[in-house]
Amino acid sequence: MCGVKTLPESPDAFKEATWEDVRPFYEELASRPLHAGNVEEWLADWSRFESLLSEASALASFDYSCDTADPARESAQLRFGTQISPKAQEQRVRLQERLLKLGYVRAGLETTIERFRNQMQIFNEANVPLSAELSRLTTSWSKVIGAMTVEWEGVEKTPAQLLPYLESTDRSVRERAFKLRAKPYVQQRTAIADIFDMMYDLRQQTARNAGFDNFRDYAHQEKNRFAYTPSDCMRFHEAVETAVLPAVDRILDRRRRAMKVDRLRPWDTSVDPLGRAALEPFANIDTFVSRAGSIFGHVDAEFRNYFETMVDAKLLDLENRKGKAPGAYSQTLSFRKQPLIFMNAVGVDDDVRTLLHESGHAFHSFEASRLPILFQRHPGSEMAEVASMSMELLAAPFIGEDSGGYYNDDEQRRSCVEHLEGIVMFFPHCASVDAFQHWIYLDKAGRDRDARDARWLELRSRFEGNGVDWSGLDRERTARWYQQPHFFSSPFYYIEYGIAQLGALQVWRNSLKDPKEAVRNYRAALALGATQPLPELFRAAGARLIFDSAGMSELIGVVEEEIAKLG
């Protein structure tokens, strides 16, 4: 790096950094003479610096996610989230403006320049302290959720550790586990709602500062959603009602008849409908990891290499325990060009899909990291989720013992049917989550916690139909939105899952005809990173963007046909 400030060789140099340690690197990039002759060198230096800083921040976040009760990890997370990251974003806009004023563009940078221009348009320095406060609130929320425990037969457990009991063949056990899992969220409702109210105020103010009437419109532009609009999201909601709900009703009715019950209750939706014991894919994390490598190798030999690279580098934290933050994610360590995976495995079938899903993100990171400039690598959440959801489907044929996986033939069929049925059942959840966020930030009643809870119940009734009897369970049903991390840590990050699931189903449909060609196209699309617009990335993967009921119906039909074949 030219200039007075030499870049360190490792992200470790920023591990204990304050903003005053980071700021000079931005200052050097902002003051260095910039012209057509040195712009590529300048971009490369900026990319290298951001990679170092990003990796240090990612590791601090990962460490805190793994133990939210550790004060030192909390302090590091807050230092990056409240002191460094908001001010760094302000400096990035400053550097983006330099590049735009130069008028420089070349093949492979077009989408990057478009994003830079968009981020400049919505930036307002008054939002820097608001972003810091939002990060602080997210940390507080993680701490509340991470500390939740319940007592189950005299043993302290996290809410996630009750999930296996929802697959018990004893209906009374399932009911008890279902209600107990919701209980801490009901009990902590005031604390969680207090945090959300503060987040709501800060987000709406952020939008107003940027010149928007509401946070919904701001969030859509801030996420660089150039290929679709909020109106398209509304079309998606309506298409789910038209194209998916009938299939949901068919799945639930089959389940009800198989279970020989008059009505399904919410604790009846995870258990095997034929009364077979719950699938137990692994007894320990070592087995979980070792068999995953074999599965990935059957999809593509390079995927196994990628996964084993993460294992060797100790970049996996998979087992649920007290103090861990909820959820699962994959995060890229941009400097070393390797991803990590965080999740909360408890030994159930869903853990297999979660690991396949997060590994899809990780493989995307490996493929796109070959691109020279950091800003070219991440295409946005829609395509990122195509990577993860496609991997769930592409790997499904290999989760059996014949491929070194977890299940015998019958168990594999069960898992695949549950997966495909789960995909159909997911769309109503996706639509309700997205519709809820639209309402929260467009309607003034979104600031009222009681109104929010009431609206959530209305939307669940709209999108979930009548296949499950929720009578007498309003508190537990309301608690579901308090369990959804995206509302708190990643607002408006959810419709991407629905858009991407439709893309992934197209990749999978292609694989049913020619698996090798489908995987080749999939890898080629991932390797493009962010160098093409979203529709082109979908096209490279063999898919298209879908918001209409006709396109949705066609794919749901393919899923139902496959379910029928599997029995």
Image (tube, rainbow, N blue to C red):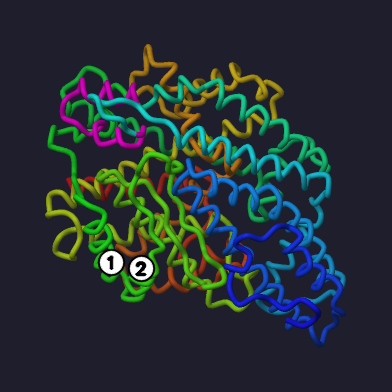
SS type, badge 2: helix
- Three-letter code, disc 2: Phe
- Image: 80 above or below 423: below
- Image: 37 above or below 404: below
- State the mark number for residue 476: none
Q: Quadrant of residue 263?
A: top left
Residue at 18% across / 58% down in the picture?
400
The answer for how far apart the CA atoms under marks 2 and 1 are is 6 Å
Q: Are marks 2 and 1 in contact (CB under 8 Å)?
A: yes
Whole-percent x, y for residue 115 in the image? 71, 61
Q: What secondary structure prevails in the magenta region?
A: helix
Residue at 25% across / 36% down in the picture?
164
User: Which sits earlier in the primary sequence, circle 2 or circle 1?
Assistant: 1
| Nearer to the camera, 230 or 367 | 367
- Image: 343 above or below 379: above
| Quadrant where the image shows the C terminus | top left
| Nearer to the camera, 385 or 92 | 92
Residue at 41% across / 21% down in the picture?
476
- Which residue in the structure is indicated by mark 2? 307
Residue at 26% across / 43% down in the picture?
418
- Which residue in the structure is indicated by mark 1? 293
Indicate whether residue 549 is drawn in magenta.
Answer: no
Indicate whether residue 171 is drawn in magenta.
Answer: yes
Q: Badge 2 local density, few (<14 within 10 Å), some, or many (20+)?
A: many
Magenta stretch in the rendered image: 158-180
Q: Image check: 182 left or right of 97?
A: left
| Nearer to the camera, 111 or 453 | 453
Whole-percent x, y for residue 462 in the image? 48, 25
Q: Quadrant of residue 32?
A: bottom right
- Three-letter code, disc 1: Gly
